[in-house]
Image (tube, rainbow, N blue to C red):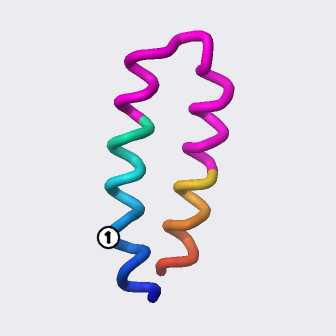
Amino acid sequence: MTARNALLTPRNGALTAWNGGLTAPNDPLIASNGSLTAWNGALTL
């Protein structure tokens, strides 16, 4: 499961950046998602 999550984390990072490009008003939410992505990355290690 951990290895599987490692594959999903970069993908989510790409989606976060994509959403950031589309929605400036959602910046606070995007930043929050970025924190969760980094947290998942730490768990993957």
Whole-percent x and y of residue 25? 61, 11
Residue beneath the point at 54% across and 57% down: 38
Residue sitting nearer the eye, 39 or 11:
11
Residue at 47% from the left image edge and 80% from the top image edge: 45
Q: How many marks?
A: 1
Q: How far across and how far down the image is residue 39, in percent?
A: 61, 62
Q: Is residue 10 left or right of residue 43?
A: left
- Residue at 45% over, 88% down: 1
Would you call the spot at circle 1 few (<14 residues within 10 Å), some (14-19), or many (20 or more)?
Answer: few
Secondary structure, magenta segment, majority class: helix
Residue 34 magenta-drawn?
Answer: yes
Residue 20 location, x and y as percent? 45, 24
Q: Quick check: 4 left or right of 36? A: left
Q: Residue beneath label 1, please?
A: 7
Q: Which residues are magenta?
A: 17-35
Amino acid at circle 1: Leu
